[in-house]
Image: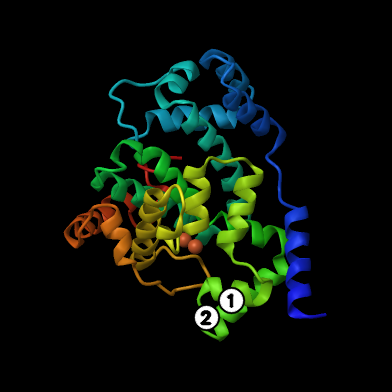
């Protein structure tokens, strides 16, 4: 079998078995997407799932959103947060369930990237207003790694081995073993889940953000956050490699090195020694 045939086979095997959203989450996500339901209709649907209810209320009351009053009801939380954020939260819980089962390091890394993307976005006038949605893209950026772990566990082991033994970067090791990388894998899943471009493109282009055709600002914010978080020490478990920061990404966001220094200074308070314990964690 040629390398091309092997890679094509792997790709088909991978695409055929992409995970679907759990039934309940799928139902809620469709209702949100159809725009035909009111906040209270969707609130009723969500209230059937206690874990999700708790998550929505926690998110609405978290320091991340900074509402001064306590948000007690689901409807109120839905109106305040907006349906897009709720949809993101639903998708996020599905991904988190997968991540927690598979790789704790990746979960910590993703959470830290979400928080740091929020900090970067806050500094950039072009995306400041959309910082919550863009932070969500930060959370999901390495989705492809989770799916590879779940769908192709043996190949994921070979990838980890190459990274460790050959000291290879993650993307190159994935391409060597699979013929595709986690950016592509993540995009395939994001597309099959019909995520918006603002999420799909940062997932696909977080290592080369200026190549993103529609959401390059979001991709650039995630790119910067990813590198800052790796430098800070929250890496995915198998790799300690910190890729170079793309200077054009900084420029694209209208930021200078001073702004990045400010973000770095804010990170310890925002992330803490264990980001998963942080009360500031948005999810
Ligand atoms: Fe990545
Ligand atoms: Fe990452």
Q: Position of residue 6 (x, y in %)?
A: 77, 74
Q: Residue at x 50, y 45 (%)?
A: 199
**Ligand 1 within 8 angstroms of badge 1 C-beta:** no
Locate residue 259: give its quadrant.
bottom left
Which numbered disc covers residue 168?
2
Residue 162's place in the image compared with 282, above or below, is below
Among numbered discs 1 and 2, the one appearing first in the sequence: 2
Q: Position of residue 250 (x, y in %)?
A: 28, 59
Q: Residue at x 37, y 47 (%)?
A: 278
Q: What SS does tag 1 mark?
A: helix
Locate residue 11: give its quadrant.
bottom right
Cβ atoms under marks 1 and 2 closer than 8 Å: yes
**Ligand 1 within 8 angstroms of badge 2 C-beta:** no
Q: Position of residue 10 (x, y in %)?
A: 75, 67
- Nearest to the observer: residue 33 or residue 261: 33
Disc 1: which residue: 173
Q: Is residue 277 visible?
A: yes
């Amino acid at each position: 079998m040629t390398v091309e045939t092997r890679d094509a086979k792997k790709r088909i095997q991978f695409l055929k078995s992409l995970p679907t959203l759990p039934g309940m989450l799928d139902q809620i996500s469709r209702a949100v997407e159809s725009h035909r339901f009111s906040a209270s209709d969707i609130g009723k649907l969500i209230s059937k799932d206690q874990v999700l209810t708790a998550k929505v209320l926690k998110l609405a009351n978290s320091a991340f959103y900074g509402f001064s009053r306590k948000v007690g009801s689901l409807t109120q939380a839905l109106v305040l947060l907006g349906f897009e954020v709720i949809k993101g939260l639903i998708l996020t819980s599905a991904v988190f369930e997968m991540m927690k089962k598979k790789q704790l390091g990746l979960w910590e890394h993703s959470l830290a990237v979400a928080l740091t993307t929020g900090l970067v976005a806050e500094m950039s006038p072009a995306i400041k207003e959309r910082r919550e949605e863009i932070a969500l893209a930060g959370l999901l950026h390495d989705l492809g790694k989770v799916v590879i772990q779940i769908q192709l566990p043996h190949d994921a082991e070979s990838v980890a081995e190459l990274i460790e033994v050959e000291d290879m970067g993650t993307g190159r090791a994935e391409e060597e073993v699979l013929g595709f990388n986690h950016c592509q894998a993540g995009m395939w899943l994001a597309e099959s889940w019909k995520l918006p471009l603002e999420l799909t493109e940062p997932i696909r282009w977080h290592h080369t953000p200026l190549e993103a055709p529609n959401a390059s600002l979001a991709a650039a914010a995630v790119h910067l956050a990813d590198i800052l978080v790796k430098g800070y020490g929250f890496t995915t478990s198998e790799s300690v490699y910190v890729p170079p920061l793309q200077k054009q990404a900084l420029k694209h966001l209208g930021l200078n090195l001073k702004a990045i220094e400010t973000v770095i200074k804010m990170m310890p308070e925002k992330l803490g020694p264990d980001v998963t314990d942080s009360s500031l964690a948005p999810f």
